[in-house]
Structure formats: C-alpha cells, structure tokens
Image (spheres, helix red, strand yellow):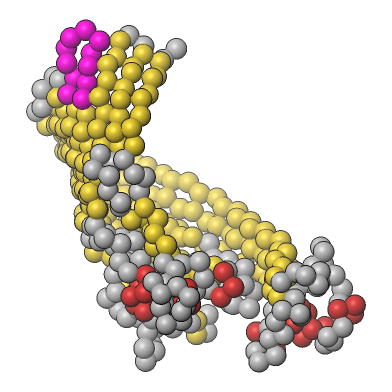
C-alpha cells in the first residue's frame, strides 16, 4: 500500500526430530553408571518479505544483494515496476526463501557413588545444544547451533539425623559458537554466533532445621563466565571470526547478565499455639552484571548494579486454610534486571547520535516496588 512505510510478511517453519534414551547399570550396590544418547535432525525454513516501500527508501546506495523491501523485489525480478512482481500472501513479492538443515548426536556420561545412607557423590559429563536458524532480516546469514559441554562434580548429603541437608556442585562449561542476540537496524533482532566462552562455577545450598519450630535455608552461586576467544561479529567460511584488529568483545570479556556472585537466605519460625502463627524473612543478593557483550555497546548501556531484596511474610493457619500478610521488596529496592534501547544501541543510546535525547534512550527494567498483600488459601 502506498501509505505503508514498512511491511513484514513471513512464514517460519521449525521442525525437530529426535530419538533419545539412556541406560543405567549398577556396577555394585554403591556405584552405578549412566550412558545417554540423543540423535537429532533439524529442518528450519523462513520465506517471505520484509522492508520499506519504494516511496520511503530506495536503498540505491546499498549493494544489490543487501537490498530489501520493494527495492529487494526490484533486484530479484529485474524490474522496478511492481505490477511485474508476483505477489506473495498479500506482500509485494516473495523476496527470500531460506532453509537450514543439520543433524548430530549428543552424549551423557554419569557415575554416582552412594557413600552411605546420608551421602552421595556424582560426576557427570553431558552435552547440550540450541538449534540454529534463520534471521528475520533475511540479508543476514543463518546462525549456527551452539553447543555446551558440561563437566560437573557434585554431592548430596544429610547430617544430624536429617536435620541438615547440604548439596552442591562444581562445574566447568565450555560454550561453543554461542548464539548472541542484539537489536539491529529497523528494530529487528539480529542473532549471530559469538565464538567460544567458558563458565566455571560453584553452586551450593543448605537447609537446616535448627529447632522443631525454626528452619533456615540458604543458597549461593559463584560464576566465572567469560569469552575464551575474540568476538568479531562476523562469520568466515560459516564459522565465527576470532581474528580481527578491534574485536567487538576481546577474549576474557565477562558474559552479560551473569553476576560473579549471587546468594539467598531465608528463615522461618512457627509457633506451637492456636492458629499456628508463623513469620518468615527472605533475603536475596545479586552482584553487578554487564548489560551487553559488546564493549562499546556496554559502555553506552552501562552495567546493571548489584542489588539486595528483602521479603517478609507472616500469618496464621488452621486445619486446611491459611491467611498470610506479605511485604515484597521491603526496602523498596530498584533492582535492575535489564537495560536496553528501542533501536540499535549506537543510535538510540549515544548522546551525540540522538541529540533530541541528551541522556540517550536507555531503558531500565526494574523490580516491582514495595508491595503489600493479603493472601488466603484453602485446601479441599
């Protein structure tokens, strides 16, 4: 239509076929092993039209292979006369049609040793993946599947006649060709592969029945998550390029949205009197996190600062019903969970590029403010 600036009309089909299973064998009464296998076949396709109408953007300065919208239709069919283009599902033409197919195998190996009735240790090697696919911006190449190799050692234990539970795991994860999504031109999300990364971590949790009435639970996680190769933002021979003069993110850059440390603790007390009153406090801490993988984009967006969250709930219970009063985010913390812009970060976030917005257009997704509530539940 003449008054339509931009049109997207696309049909996407993602098909995954898989067969998987695992076999567990008891070597002894205490030691058992597990072997798992998954075979998969993916077939993804995207076809359709996207882009500007002729009256809004001719894209004459772009190479023919990079033109899209009605300018792309003109390149595909060799004429600027729209009446000569075969329409497609109400769009001016079918500008593109792309398909990607892949298959592979994933493995899992596990050994579990039952030390006694109260303690067990295990070791696991496992593989996982996310399918690759086709970008909505069809001028970009498809993105590859990314794979995760996980090596883990953990323990599950109980102590003091089951009054204390202590579990944990140490792990190393190698993330190959990991998919990295960002907001590109025209408000379309672009997905690229960002070379290699590694996550070394420790996670633990404990639950303690200090007395019959008082229980305490706590958990923590420590993560060293970083690139192990440069991220250059381009594919070479179908693989992420790592050798470039100025990488978007150099080797050693921390991965975004991943704090180095986070932890929580909660305590609950229940009184042995009529209507079983109770009081519970919960505390959560999460450390500073990067907003974006790209060094320059993260400088514009800024890091997400560390935050503390405190929740309180108290109430009474009788038979099959419970009445509770709660306060979430007791200290009214404005914890940041995401920072983003509505168009490419260098356009909407930079002060010198968006002069009408002297502070840039960086948005923050924050926690819900202090919230009071009354809740009634009943079991039937």
Image height check: is 318 above or below 327? above
Image height check: is 74 above or below 138? below
Prevalent SS, magenta region: loop
Q: Is residue 346 left or right of residue 133?
A: left
In the image, is residue 272 part of the stretch drawn in magenta?
yes
| Quadrant assignment, res 41 | bottom right
Asked whether the viewer can see residue 233, the reply is no
Residue extending farthest right: 83
Q: Is residue 346 left or right of residue 162?
A: right
In depth, the one of 160 and 88 nearer the eye is 88
Q: Specify start and end residues of the magenta stretch as a single range.
A: 269-279
In depth, the one of 354 and 68 nearer the eye is 354
Q: Is residue 201 left or right of residue 245?
A: left
Residue 21, position in %: x, y? 48, 46
Q: Is residue 55 left or right of residue 380?
A: right
Residue 107, position in %: x, y? 42, 56
* Image quarter (top left, top right, bottom left or bottom right) of the C terminus: top left
Residue 378, position in %: x, y? 40, 15
Asked whether the viewer can see residue 224, the reply is yes
Residue 218, position in %: x, y? 19, 40
| Residue appearing at x 50%, y 85% in the figure | 236
| Residue appearing at x 53%, y 62% in the figure | 131
In the image, is residue 241 part of the stretch drawn in magenta?
no
In depth, the one of 243 and 338 nearer the eye is 338
* Image quarter (top left, top right, bottom left or bottom right) of the N terminus: bottom right
| Residue appearing at x 41%, y 67% in the figure | 362
């Amino acid at each position: 239509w003449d008054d339509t600036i931009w049109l997207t009309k696309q049909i996407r089909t993602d098909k995954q076929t898989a067969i998987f299973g695992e076999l567990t064998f008891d070597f002894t009464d205490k030691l058992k092993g597990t072997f798992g296998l998954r075979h998969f076949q993916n077939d993804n396709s995207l076809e359709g039209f996207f882009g500007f109408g002729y009256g809004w953007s001719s894209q004459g300065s772009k190479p023919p292979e990079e033109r899209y919208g009605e300018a792309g239709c003109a390149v595909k069919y060799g004429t600027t006369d729209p009446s000569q283009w075969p329409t497609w599902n109400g769009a001016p033409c079918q500008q593109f049609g792309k398909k990607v197919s892949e298959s592979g195998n994933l493995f899992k190996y596990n050994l579990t040793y039952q030390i006694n009735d109260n303690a067990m240790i295990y070791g696991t090697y496992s593989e996982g993946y996310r399918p690759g696919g086709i970008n909505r911006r069809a001028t970009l190449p498809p993105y590859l599947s990314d794979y995760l190799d996980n090596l883990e050692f953990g323990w599950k234990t109980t102590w003091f006649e089951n009054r204390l539970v202590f579990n944990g795991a140490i792990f190393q994860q190698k993330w190959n060709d990991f998919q990295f999504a960002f907001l590109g031109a025209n408000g379309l999300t672009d997905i690229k592969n960002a070379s290699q990364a590694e996550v070394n971590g420790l996670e633990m949790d404990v639950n303690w029945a200090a007395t019959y009435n008082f229980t305490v639970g706590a958990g923590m996680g420590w993560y060293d998550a970083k690139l192990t190769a440069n991220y250059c933002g381009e594919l070479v021979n179908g693989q992420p390029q790592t050798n470039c003069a100025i990488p978007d993110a150099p080797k050693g850059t921390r991965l975004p949205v991943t704090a180095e440390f986070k932890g929580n603790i909660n305590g609950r007390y229940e009184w042995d009197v009529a209507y079983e009153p109770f009081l519970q406090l919960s505390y959560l801490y999460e450390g500073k996190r990067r907003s974006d993988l790209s060094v320059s984009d993260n400088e514009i967006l800024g890091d997400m600062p560390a935050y503390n969250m405190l929740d309180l709930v108290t109430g009474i219970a009788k038979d099959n019903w419970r009445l509770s009063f709660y306060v979430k985010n007791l200290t009214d913390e404005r914890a940041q969970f995401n920072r983003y812009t509505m168009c490419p970060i260098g356009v909407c976030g930079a002060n010198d590029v968006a002069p009408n917005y002297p502070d840039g257009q960086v948005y923050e997704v924050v926690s819900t403010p202090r919230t009071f509530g009354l809740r009634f539940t009943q079991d039937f």
